[in-house]
Image: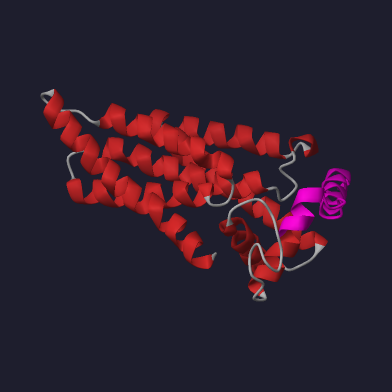
C-alpha cells in the first residue's frame, strides 16, 4: 500500500512539474497555429513548420494545460519505446528488442534526461525511429520490389518529417543514405548502382513530401 502511495505521489509530482522553457513556447505556438496563426508572421520560431503543427496536434489531443504537456511527453516516449523495440527485434529478435525498449523506459523515468518534458527531440525521435524501422524491414522484404517500394516511401516520409520538425534531424538522412548503399547488392557494379538509384528515388519521393508541404504552408 505504501509503495502504491509513493508511486502515485511520484506520478502526480511529474504532472505538476514546472513548465520547461522550450516546451511552453512550442505548446503556445502549436495552439496559435491551430487557431489559424501564420508561421513566421503571427508567431516566430527558428524551427520548421511541422514542429508547430505537431505540437498543435498534441495540444488538441491532450489539452492545453500543464498536465496535457506531461501526458503528451509520455505518449511520445512510449512511441519511442515502441520504435526501439521494433528496431531491436529486426536485428536480434523479440527478447533483445524488449530489453532495448525497457532500457529506454528506465532512462525516461529519470527527470534529468528531460524525457518527462515535451521537448522537440521527443517528436523528432518518435518519427525518425519508425523511419529507421521501415529501413530495417528492407532486410526482411528483400526480393519483393512492391513491398520494398512502400517501405522506402514510408521511411522517407517519416525521416523527412522529422527534419521538418527540427533541422538537426538531417543527420538521419545521412544514415538512411548509408543503409541504402549497404543494401544495394548485385552481381556487378552497374546492377548495384541501378538498384541504389531506384531505391534512392523512392526514398526521396517520401522524404520530399513533407518538405513540399512545408513550402506550401509557408
Left or right: residue 127 versus residue 149 is right
Q: Is residue 6 magenta?
A: yes
Q: In x, y percent, where is residue 80? A: 57, 44
Picture residue at 50% right of the left edge, 42% below the top: 129
Q: Residue at 45% x, 49% y: name it.
A: 160
User: Where is 84 relative to 33, above or below?
Assistant: above
Residue that sits furthest to the front in the current view: 41
Q: Quadrant of residue 182?
A: top left
Q: Position of residue 2 (x, y in %)?
A: 89, 45
- Residue situated in front as seen by the camera: 171 or 103: 171
- Residue drawn at x 55%, y 31% as measured from the top left: 99
Q: Nearer the viewer, residue 81 or 27?
A: 27
- Left/right placement of residue 159 relative to residue 109 reads left
Question: Horizontally, is 216 left or right of 79 in the view?
Answer: left
Residue 143 visible here: yes
Residue 141 is at least partly visible in this image:
no
- The magenta-colored residue range is 1-26
Main secondary structure of the magenta stretch: helix
Residue lying farthest bottom? 35
As rendered, which of 183 and 136 lies closer to the eye?
A: 183
The image position of residue 69, as x and y in percent, is 75, 58
Between 174 and 106, the one nearer to me in the picture: 174
**Quadrant (top left, top right, bottom left, bottom right) of the C terminus:** bottom right
In reply to whether residue 159 is colored magenta, the answer given is no
Question: Residue at horizontal 60%, vertical 50%?
Answer: 123
Q: Position of residue 127 (x, y in %)?
A: 51, 49
Amino acid at each position: 500500500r505504501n509503495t502504491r502511495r509513493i508511486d502515485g505521489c511520484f506520478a502526480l509530482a511529474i504532472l505538476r512539474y514546472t513548465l520547461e522553457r522550450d516546451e511552453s513556447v512550442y505548446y503556445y505556438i502549436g495552439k496559435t497555429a491551430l487557431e489559424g496563426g501564420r508561421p513566421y508572421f503571427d508567431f516566430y520560431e527558428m524551427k520548421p513548420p511541422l514542429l508547430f503543427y505537431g505540437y498543435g496536434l498534441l495540444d488538441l489531443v491532450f489539452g492545453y494545460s500543464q498536465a496535457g504537456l506531461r501526458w503528451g511527453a509520455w505518449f511520445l516516449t512510449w512511441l519511442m519505446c515502441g520504435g526501439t523495440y521494433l528496431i531491436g527485434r529486426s536485428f536480434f529478435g523479440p527478447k533483445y528488442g524488449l530489453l532495448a525498449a525497457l532500457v529506454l523506459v528506465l532512462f525516461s523515468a529519470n527527470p534529468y534526461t528531460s524525457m518527462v518534458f515535451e521537448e522537440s527531440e521527443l517528436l523528432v525521435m518518435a518519427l525518425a525511429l519508425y523511419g529507421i524501422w521501415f529501413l530495417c524491414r528492407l532486410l526482411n522484404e528483400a526480393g519483393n520490389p512492391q513491398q520494398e517500394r512502400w517501405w522506402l516511401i514510408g521511411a522517407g516520409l517519416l525521416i523527412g518529417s522529422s527534419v521538418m520538425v527540427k533541422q538537426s534531424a538531417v543527420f538521419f538522412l545521412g544514415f538512411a543514405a548509408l543503409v541504402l548503399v549497404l543494401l544495394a547488392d548485385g552481381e556487378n557494379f552497374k546492377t548495384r548502382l541501378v538498384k541504389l538509384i531506384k531505391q534512392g528515388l523512392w526514398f526521396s519521393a517520401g522524404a520530399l513530401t513533407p518538405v513540399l508541404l512545408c513550402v506550401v504552408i509557408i
